[in-house]
Structures are given as C-alpha cells and as structure tokens.
Image (tube, rainbow, N blue to C red):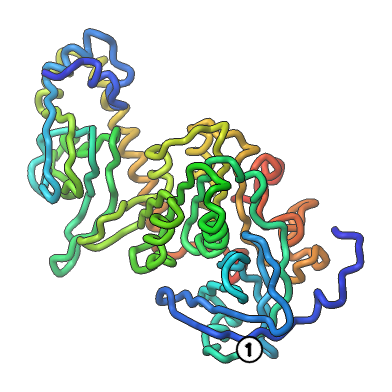
C-alpha cells in the first residue's frame, strides 16, 4: 500500500473520493527503475498501469530491420501503459527509463476486479483512460503533421 | 498602411558578400553576410529581404545578434525557387539585401524578467538572434529558458551551440523531437509536452515564441493553463512578406501589416485576428 496523498495527486484518480482512494492505495505500489531499464516490452502481456513520479521514460516502437523508433517521452505526473486497462491487454510499445526513475504502478486485473464491484469508480477511471488515449492520439497526429513537414501554401517559402 | 513615403533606398537592394556558408541540416544553410558600407543595424526578430537578380526575393529573419561580429547570419531553408538558388551561393558569392524590416522582439519588456523562448522547427533561426543578445547582456535578464522542437535530432538547428548557450548564457534548454532512433537522450513528443515541466512565474515571465502557426494553437493553450497573461506572450508570425514596408499588402491581415507592425506581435493584439495564428 502507498500513501493515499500520493494516489490522490495522480491525474488518473483526480475524481475519486476518499474511500475509493484508500482502496486504490491498497493496490498501488512504487517501483524504481535504473537508467536503461526496460519497464515493459512491446507485444508482451500488459499487466500494469503506470504513473511516472520521478525521472523520464521513453516510449519506443519496434520498426523495420530491428530499428527502434522513439515516439514519446513520459514526464513526471503523466500516466502511461493504458494497454493494461484495455483488451487485448498487450503493450503496444516498449518503455525504457532514460534516467533513474520512479513510478506508481497498479495491476490492471486487480483494478478491473475492484471496479466490477464498484462500476461507478470504474467508469470514472475509464473516462480518464479514454482522455489519455485521446490525448496521445492527438499528439501522434500532430507529430505526423510535423514529420511530413505539413505546411500551407501561405507559409511555404515565407519567412525563414 | 504607412503614410510616410518610403525611403527610395528601401526599394534598392544593397549587395552583400557571403563570407561563410555552412550547412546546418540537410535543408538549412547558414550564411554569414557582410554589407560593404554599413552594419545591418537590426534588432532581434527583424528580417531582411534577400534577392538574387533574375530569380527573386524572399523574406528571411536575421539569425544573429547585432552584438556579434560585423556582419549578420541568415539561416535559409531550401523550400522554393529563391531559397534553392540561394543554397547555390558559395562563400565569396553576393546577394541583394533590403532591410532590416519589422519591429522585432520586445527587448525592453524582457529586461529584468524571466524569459521563456519557444522555438518550433525553423523558428529557432530568428530566436537565435535573441538568444545571442541575452547571452551578451545576461545580467539584464532573470531566468532564461529555451524550449526547442524539431522533427528529428538531425533537423535540430544550431545544436552545436546549445552547450555554449547553457554554460555561458546560463540558459536552461530543453529540446524535443517528433521521432528519434534509439540513442537519442532528449525528449520525444510535442513541444507543448515541455511546458508543464518548467518553472514559471506567470507575472514575471515574458514568452517569445516562433514556429509554425499550428504550434501556436497548442502552445497558447498550455501557456494559458500556466496562467501567463496574454500581454506577456509574443508570437512571431510567418506570412508571405514582399515589400517589407506595408505597401504591397501581401502580408496584410485586416488592418495589420505583418512586415511593418510585426512580425513579432503581442498575443492580446492577435486575439482579434484569429486567422493570424491558424
């Protein structure tokens, strides 16, 4: 169990009441990761939902010819590994600590079990998870626009 | 529109010599130019019109501070006919220069304040002028932060200068890229991702941002979430500027001439001009 104050600070659990936070705190734990350590690997079963407390974690995907593409850097306070909450519960990317890091983790199946008896809490969390996925999707679209050097005729060869 | 008749000299390019040309990335080159009879006399954020006879003219922001050397730097991305031809200019070659034009960055507003600079892609080229100025007069500013966004680590501009800016200029620099290969130790993601991570005192911070319009939309949301007042945020606009003197109307947005009234604008002034940052 971790300190309930810490759980309350997490954006994922912002809407939760005191009792819910206490129950969640029972399921949460804190894990430390050394620089270069893999938190989880792409395509492996997604077991835990993470919120980064300290350090930096990079999300990367396997590309062609064994190359890895770094796609997102998780900053402290941000949640990641939403795959643990959504079937088929497999990580869609890998996560590696790029500096000594610390994360609050909670097992997805335990959360699912808790929320079967507390569907209202489950709904609140899934709304947050949906927001997280939506935000990541928007970021990905914008990154794609940038990568493809998207620009309007107006600003092509405008001011360098 | 300006009512004053323009100085005839403003229409006539002066011939500048490129004393040094170096590639920065696959698509950007840095030109160091010298005018024969005068210093350019520009302020950070101002731009010049660069021309090649028989090809055309393009507006390019000055990438160096007037506090550095006798000439000035232009960072030029290869995007069209003029810039393509400019990329063929070698050291010793000559180009036409008109300007400087525009009103530039708010130096006086930044003095005695924390300064947050946000540069997306080629936006670092004009901001480098402000960065150099701040490095040269560091005691006039409080905490200085520079956020840089680029597509890949290979497209980061002036990456070989970051250490000097950090060490000599005491500038906190954070860079992020849209994608990278394994081995990159900086951040990956949008530049907006960096804004929640930095310390900001909203009432003593001046923000100067330069990047593509789409960046402004999302940067503004993040800055507003950090409660930075609109009158402390300055954006540099990209428009197709031609004459540089508010005469031709190419860069006009309603009653605003970007070449004359900008290209750096205080955000509360742009609130009435939604198309300016969309």
Asked if A62 appears above or below A26 in the picture, the reply is below
Residue A146 makes an appearance in the image = no
| Residue A111 in picture, x, y percent from top left | 14, 23
Q: Residue at x 54, y 79 (%)?
A: B31
Pointer 1 chain: B
**Residue annotated with mark 1:** B94
Most extreme residue toward the top is A19
| Residue B128 in picture, x, y percent from top left | 52, 62
Q: Is residue A130 left or right of residue B70?
A: left
Asked if B68 appears above or below B13 in the picture, the reply is above
Q: Residue at x 15, y 69 (%)?
A: A65
Most extreme residue toward the front is B139
Q: Is residue A64 left or right of residue B141?
A: left
Number of callouts: 1
A121, B138: nearer the viewer? B138
Asked if A110 appears above or below B197 in the picture, the reply is above
A133, B35: nearer the viewer? B35
| SS at badge 1 | strand
Toward which corner of the image does residue B231 lie, by quadrant? top right
| Residue A50 in picture, x, y percent from top left | 19, 34
Q: Residues within 10 Å of mark 1 (few under 14, many from 20)?
A: many
B45, B172: nearer the viewer? B172
Q: Is residue B10 left or right of residue A128?
A: right
| Residue A25 in picture, x, y percent from top left | 16, 17
Q: Residue at x 40, y 61 (%)?
A: B164
Toward which corner of the image does residue B266 lie, by quadrant? top right
Q: Is residue B259 left or right of residue B221?
A: right
Residue B17 makes an appearance in the image = yes
């Amino acid at each position: 169990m971790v300190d309930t104050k810490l759980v309350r600070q997490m954006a994922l659990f912002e809407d939760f009441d005191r009792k819910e936070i206490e129950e969640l705190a029972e399921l949460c734990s804190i894990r430390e990761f050394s620089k270069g350590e893999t938190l989880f690997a792409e395509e492996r079963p997604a077991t835990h939902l993470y919120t980064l407390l300290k350090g930096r974690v990079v999300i990367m995907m396997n590309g062609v010819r064994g190359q890895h593409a770094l796609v997102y850097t998780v900053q402290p306070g941000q949640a990641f590994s939403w795959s643990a909450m959504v079937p088929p519960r497999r990580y869609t990317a890998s996560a590696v600590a790029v500096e000594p890091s610390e994360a609050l983790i909670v097992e997805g199946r335990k959360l699912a079990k808790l929320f079967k008896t507390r569907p209202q809490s489950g709904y609140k969390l899934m709304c947050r998870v949906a927001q997280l996925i939506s935000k990541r999707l928007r970021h990905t679209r914008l990154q794609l626009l940038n990568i493809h050097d998207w620009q309007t005729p107006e600003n092509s060869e405008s001011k360098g | 529109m300006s009512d004053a008749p323009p100085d005839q000299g403003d229409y006539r390019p002066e011939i500048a010599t490129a004393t040094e040309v170096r590639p920065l990335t696959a698509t950007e080159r840095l030109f160091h130019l010298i005018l024969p009879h005068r210093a350019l006399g520009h302020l950070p954020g101002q731009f010049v019109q660069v021309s090649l006879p028989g090809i055309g003219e393009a507006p390019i922001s000055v990438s160096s501070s007037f506090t550095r050397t006798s000439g000035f730097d232009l960072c030029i991305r290869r995007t069209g006919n003029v810039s393509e031809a400019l990329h063929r200019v070698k050291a010793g070659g000559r180009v036409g220069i008109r300007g400087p034009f525009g009103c530039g960055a708010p130096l006086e507003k930044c003095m005695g304040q924390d300064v947050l600079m946000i540069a997306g892609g080629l936006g670092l080229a004009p901001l480098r002028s402000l960065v150099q100025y701040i490095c040269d007069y560091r005691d006039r500013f409080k905490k200085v932060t520079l956020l840089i966004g680029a597509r890949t680590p290979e497209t980061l501009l002036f990456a070989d200068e970051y250490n000097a800016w950090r060490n000599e200029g005491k500038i906190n620099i954070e860079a992020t890229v849209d994608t990278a290969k394994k081995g990159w130790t900086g951040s990956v993601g949008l530049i907006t991702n960096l804004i929640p991570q930095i310390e900001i005192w909203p009432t003593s911070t001046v923000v100067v941002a330069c990047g593509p319009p789409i960046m402004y939309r999302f940067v503004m949301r993040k800055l507003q979430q950090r409660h930075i007042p609109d009158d402390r945020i300055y954006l540099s606009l990209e428009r197709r500027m031609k004459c540089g003197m508010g005469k031709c109307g190419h860069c006009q947005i309603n009653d605003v001439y970007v070449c004359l009234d900008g290209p750096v604008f205080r955000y509360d002034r742009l609130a009435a001009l939604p198309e300016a940052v969309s």
